[in-house]
Amino acid sequence: PLGCTSTIVYLMYQENKVEIDPQTAGLMMSAIISDTLLFRSPTCTKTDEMAARALAEIAGVDIEKYAMEMFSAASDLKQKTDREIFYQDFKTFTAGDIHFGVSQVSSLNEEELLSLKPRLFHFAKEALGEENLDMAFVMLTNILKQDTLLLAVGHRAETLIQNAFLLEPKKESFDFSGEEVEGYTAVLENVVSRKKQLIPPLSLYGEQM
């Protein structure tokens, strides 16, 4: 297993002794940086990091500096609607009889992430109906702190979080454009990967509910 498909593509270039041009190297490097959160994600392997650093040399960039600029640009959400933010990285899952969805927003800016709470709580409730979900979760992932503030709405979402992560979620209420929005939040330390760290425990305990 590898953290990014571009790592596989890089290895295919190497195996076939095909030269990689700087533009292609930059694109492949960017994909690895994105998928591995610059080697911070638990999905990242030594092969991913080796490939990304080799591609950075070909592209002629300082990979750490480039990554911070890339994350800053990607996490600038000021011009995006709540729908665009929620659906920019959203996937649905089924565990037993439970159908749930998880949106993930990653940013370097803690204040920006916290400012999204009422907006995304409100839209997550809308998504329950739009996607025919039992529960909806939003991962507000801080790239620098390496943690996630998890927002949860839907019937029995609180119980699923309690069972999956052995912690007590906090009930919160917000006034959003004159409408009261309620949901639950939980801080998940050292959790940044939806695929590897969030979905397995949610699915395991979801099947038992």
Image (cartoon, rainbow, N blue to C red):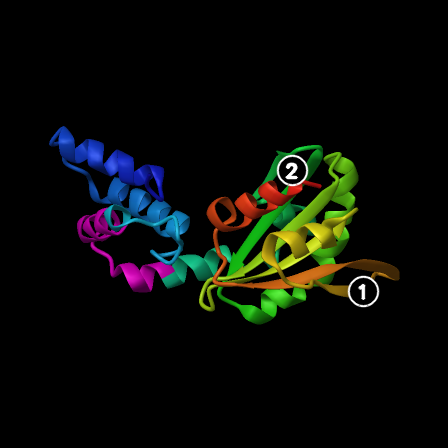
Q: Is residue 7 magenta?
A: no
**Residue 81 can be seen, yes or no:** no
Furthest residue to the front? 208
Task: Tell me the number on the disc at residue 207.
Answer: 2
Rendered residue at 18%/53% (across/down): 57
Q: Nearer the viewer, residue 114 or 186?
A: 186
For residue 39, what is the image quadrant?
Answer: bottom left
Q: Secondary structure at mark 2?
A: loop
- Picture quarter containing residue 179? bottom right
Q: Which residue appears at 65% of the width and 53% of the height?
A: 163
**Residue furthest left in the image:** 17
96 or 37: nearer the eye?
96
Q: CA distance from mark 1 to mark 2?
A: 28 Å
Asked if residue 192 is positioned above or below residue 99 in the image, the reply reads: below
Foreground disc of the pair 1, 2: 2
In the image, 115 versus 193, the foreground residue is 193
Residue under pointer 1 = 173
Q: Earlier in the sequence, mark 1 or mark 2?
A: 1
**Under tag 1, what secondary structure?**
strand
Read off the magenta span.
49-67
Type of amino acid under label 2: Glu
Give how far across and how far down residue 183 sits, in percent.
77, 58
> Does 63 appear in magenta?
yes
